[in-house]
Image: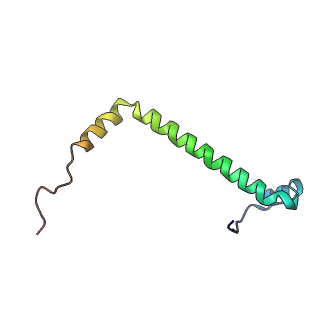
Amino acid sequence: MKKMTFSVPEPLAAQFLRRVASRDRSRFVSEALAARLEQRDVALIRACEVANQDLDVAEIEKEFDGIGDEMAEPWM
């Protein structure tokens, strides 16, 4: 476990303190944070899937694939 400190808006803090028993607060925050992070992962995966179906994106990727790691002329 890792202790962390966060700042939240006063109305949200008051609502949280009213609605969630003190013994359940850490678990509640952990579950809420995990759920929100999962939502972000799903959204990112979906955005990647949409981008991968875009023909313009595929053309740009093809151009980048043609770029080699070697420098054409050394700077020395």
* Left or right for 14, reference 50: right
Quarter of the image holding residue 14? Answer: bottom right
Q: Position of residue 46 (x, y in %)?
A: 52, 36
Q: Position of residue 22 (x, y in %)?
A: 86, 61
The N terminus lies in quadrant = bottom right
Q: Position of residue 28 (x, y in %)?
A: 78, 54
Q: Residue at x 77, y 56 (%)?
A: 27
Would you place residue 16 above or below residue 36 in this image?
A: below
* Left or right for 74, reference 29: left
The C terminus lies in quadrant = bottom left
Q: Residue at x 40, y 34 (%)?
A: 52
Q: How is the image coloured?
A: rainbow
Quarter of the image holding residue 73? Answer: bottom left
Q: Residue at x 41, y 30 (%)?
A: 53
Q: Residue at x 17, y 55 (%)?
A: 70
Quarter of the image holding residue 41? Answer: top right
Pick the residue in front: 51 or 29: 29
Q: How many marks?
A: 0
Pick the residue in front: 19 or 8: 19
